[in-house]
Image: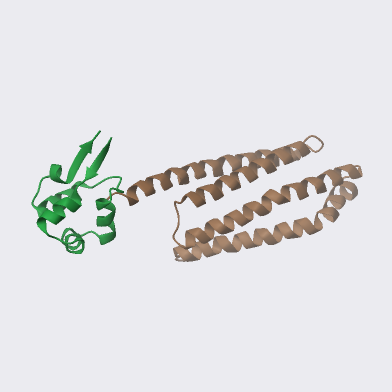
Amino acid sequence: MEIIVNLDVMMAKRKISGGELAERIGITQANLSVLKTGKAKAIRFSTLMALCHELNCQPGDLLEFRE
Amino acid sequence: MHWTRDKSIGLSLVCVGFFALALLALDIGIYWFARAFFVVLRGKPWQYAAFTVASVYLCSVPAWLTLWSLWRLLRNLRSGAVFTEENARLLRRVSWCCAIAAAMTALNGLYYLPYLFVAVAEGFMALIVRIVKNVFQEAAAMRSELDLTI
């Protein structure tokens, strides 16, 4: 079982680039890439909140649980 | 006097250098020192000096390894790599070297009792370094997790 990060799907829907999103939420592009590729071990509430705010979505739209 | 982080590490590196010189001097002069101490001063049989010379040369190997590991550890600290797996490995090596030296010195306690006190001190040092190694290992694991927290 795993948690899938659907950040790239949501970014495509909102037509926003990685660089722009990273700048808006105040993290580096490298960290955004870690998040997109599912290599992250944890995500801070502050980062999740900023992502939801900028992408105008809910946490459930970004994170998905798979058996 | 205000000591910056780099100066403090530099001082530790100098101390490691001094200990290396002292160890070199011990390696070169142990024959004459042991002979003077046991045979001339104490009037003991020559075997006492021979065993001491042999044990110093045997303990010299882990001692050099320890100094080399400490040198590398300090260089890593200076470059900013503190809580890493490599540093934990270096500390584990130092701990094992202390334990090996303690075992060798304890054997010498069989013919000259004061060596036992040195062996206990070395064993205690091995324990302290081992615990510091455990701290470094835990910190390295925590850091790796924190690095991947976005």
In front here: B41 or B52? Answer: B52
In front here: B30 or A44? Answer: A44
Q: Quadrant of the N terminus of chain A?
A: top left
Using residue B121 as the reference point, say whether residue B40 is left or right of it: right
In front here: B99 or B41? Answer: B99
Residue B64: percent from left, percent from top? 67, 54
| Chain drawn in brown | B
Q: Can you say whether B118 is above or below A33 in the image?
A: above
* Picture residue at 14% right of the left edge, 42% below the top: A60
Q: Quadrant of the C terminus of chain A?
A: top left
Using residue B87 as the reference point, say whether residue B126 is left or right of it: right
Image-quadrant location for residue B98: top right
Colour mode?
by chain
Q: Residue furthest left?
A: A56
Using residue A45 as the reference point, say whether residue B65 is left or right of it: right
Residue B29: percent from left, percent from top? 81, 58
* Picture residue at 17% right of the left edge, 62% below the top: A17
Residue B40: percent from left, percent from top? 90, 50
* Picture residue at 83% right of the left edge, 43% below the top: B51
Image-quadrant location for residue B130: top right
Please identify which colour was used for chain A in the image: green
Residue B119: percent from left, percent from top? 69, 40
* Picture residue at 51% right of the left edge, 44% below the top: B133
Using residue B2 as the reference point, say whether residue B41 is left or right of it: right
Number of labelled discs?
Answer: 0
Q: Can you say whether B71 is above or below B57 in the image?
A: below
